[in-house]
Image (spheres, rainbow, N blue to C red):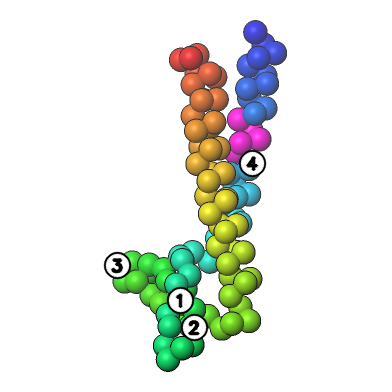
Amino acid sequence: MNLIISTVQQEKQRIDYMLVKYQKALAELPKGTISEKQVKGNTYYYLKYRAGKKIISKYIGKKEIEKLKQQIDRRRHIETMIKSLLEEQKLAAKVLEGNL
């Protein structure tokens, strides 16, 4: 039984480490979505995000659009990973408390 508890404790430590790492990565990535507008046949891209109750639209140059799309995709992936890790963390805590 000690082997199982030891393994769960190690897993919980790994989860805690990964959560901290992912939170730091999220802080560096842009949040929001990219929208595009057609004006007189030209396409303009905007990054839209919330700042409090306001929705901010920030113009994105054509040179920056691909990099920004990759960063937003990475942010979504990290957010999904964090959700998964939080569920695993709850399960590990229950096992360690003996409630499972």
Mark 1 or 2, nearer chain start: 1
Mark 2, Cα crowd under 10 Å, few <14 / some 14-19 / many 20+, is: few
Mark 3, Cα crowd under 10 Å, few <14 / some 14-19 / many 20+, is: few
| Identity, as a three-letter code, of the amino acid under mark 4 | Tyr
| Identity, as a three-letter code, of the amino acid under mark 2 | Thr
Q: Is there CB contact under 8 Å for labels 3 and 2?
A: no
Q: Is there CB contact under 8 Å for labels 1 and 2?
A: yes
Mark 3 or 2, nearer chain start: 2
Find numbered disc 3 in the image and state the secondary structure of the residue it sits on: loop
Find numbered disc 4 in the image and state the secondary structure of the residue it sits on: helix
Find numbered disc 1 in the image and state the secondary structure of the residue it sits on: strand
**Residue 5 location in percent, x, y?**
63, 16
Residue 36, disc: 1
Find numbered disc 2 in the image and state the secondary structure of the residue it sits on: strand
Q: Quadrant of residue 8?
A: top right
| Identity, as a three-letter code, of the amino acid under mark 1 | Glu
Would you name the residue on which mark 4 appears?
A: 17
- Which residue appears at 58% of the width and 67% of the height? 69
